[in-house]
Image (cartoon, grey):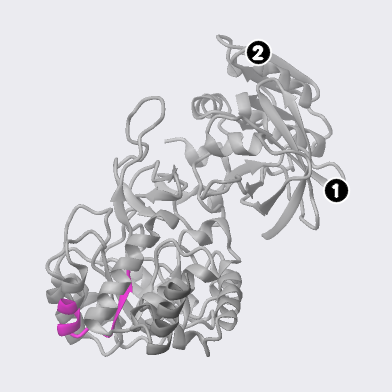
Amino acid sequence: MKILNASGCLDALTAPEVARALDVFVTKTVTPLPREGNGPPRISEVEHGMLNSIGLANPGIDAFLAETLPRLGELGVPIWVSVGGFAVSDYADLCDRLDDRPEVAAIELNVSCPNVDDVPAGVGEIVAAAHAATRKPLYTKLSPATADIAQVALAAQRAGTNGLSLVNTILGLALDERTLKPRLSRAAGGLSGPTLKPIALAAVYACYAATGLPIVGMGGIQSGHDALEFLAAGAASVALGTVLFSDPAAPGRVRAELANEIAARGVDGADNAIGLAHAEPTAVSEATARAAAMSG
Amino acid sequence: MRRERVKLAGAEQVGPYTLLRIGRGALDPGVPGQFFMLEAPGRPLPRPMSVCLAPPGELAFLIDPIGPGTRALCGLEPGDEIELLGPLGNGFRLDVGRPLLVGGGIGIAPLPFLSEALGGPPAVLGFRSDWHAEAASLVPNAEVVIEPTYVTEAMQSGHEVLACGPEPMLTAVARVEPGAQLAWEAPMACGYGACYGCAVEIGGELKRLCVAGPVLEAEAVAA
């Protein structure tokens, strides 16, 4: 069980002490060309969460490889690079460029950013192209905005993904109290924070049952108990996103809270909590439940 | 940057604003123009606030209750605890010859601390009404103008200007004083460079205000 950051929720070069508290640092999504991102305003708080429409602001793969990655490599934390593109060949090229870089422990395929206009092709096609271009482990990051996420996860699995990152944000809209106009310059933005948690848990639960792949669960994790729920739903690791904005000490705190939760339940280590929500009730607990019902 | 759970020492009404006085703990107040992220009780995100005053053992923040977060902060009572993260960002350069402080509305928030650091230089403060102008009592040697009079009409030349206020005011100040230092504002989720939410156009590029600012040289921002 590892604790990661959700891509785009931490800059390890401006806050290295936060990145070092993680087991893995995941970069902001890198695209083939530099992107300035969307115009302001591009964040807005909503009840129990926030919207963002940053728009994949990043220096592009050339500057990333030349300037950012060597500095990230000095942090002493395993690095996963998130990549995003606008065509299947973009993903293949990006993975190819990262393939021989020793700083890169794994690649996350962002096939689900809600804040760009160009929708990439089918997930299976992207994963297959990426898989052919690199020997690095691939984690495919899916959107919860789909009718049957387990089918998408199975397509990614068939195409060779090594794991899943679940979930990306889902589009939401917030209006200005006074003017009733959208608060973000692009109108809608990606919804994250505690309000996303049940949606993310449902995705983890379904994809674990369908694929058995290692899953990095994320979406509104604020506490060790939240992390435990993701493990129980089937995540092998968890990532912290929006919580990092209000609490840069969240990695250490969540780790300690999770250890306490697990110990208090008599579970032997976090890895033994994975998938607990799926376990069939045992004969003993059924008998206990029957006895309890009869004694009531 | 340091994060601490701190206790509200007191709250005072200053016109429509609230001056929150918070026990400082081991937090460094930083330099004028720097800011802290204040936990807004019951809200998902903290709020960026520049230091208004830093008396011994305390930090004071001037807050305009205009939204759910600032209203929650103004509703705090002495003894209540919140998380504080900071100091963050880049403050004002204090190596100035003949300083003139210029502020507008709630933008006067960092000026009391700045005035203290510069030995009480002259100030020009603009407000929407006499009620809002009660906040001018926090800044020594201040000339007050009320709309429709603007601060740029009362500014005298021959000074190095340090300003904070609404965007149209800062743009107007930059036009008459291209060498001014301006403290800008943007919505921020984190305050320490993680969220990329506070992008502003600086020198023709979108940059994170929390890392590049919030105090910027006027030339850097002029389009």
> Disc 1 is attached to a residue of which chain?
B
Q: In the image, what residue occupies the spot 64% across and 26% down? A: B103
Q: Which mark is residue B145?
A: 2
Residue B32 x/y as whole percent: 72, 42
Q: Is residue A268 visible?
A: yes
Q: Position of residue A67 (x, y in %)?
A: 43, 72
Disc 2 residue type (three-letter) = Val
- Residue B135's disc is none
Task: Name the side, left or right, on which B130 lies relative to A160.
Answer: right
Vertically, is A59 above or below A45? below
Give the residue pinned by disc 1: B57
* Residue at point 29%, 79% (across, down): A208
The location of residue A201, given as percent across then percent down, is 35, 67
Residue B146 is drawn in which quadrant? top right
Q: Quadrant of residue A210?
A: bottom left
Magenta extent: A154-166
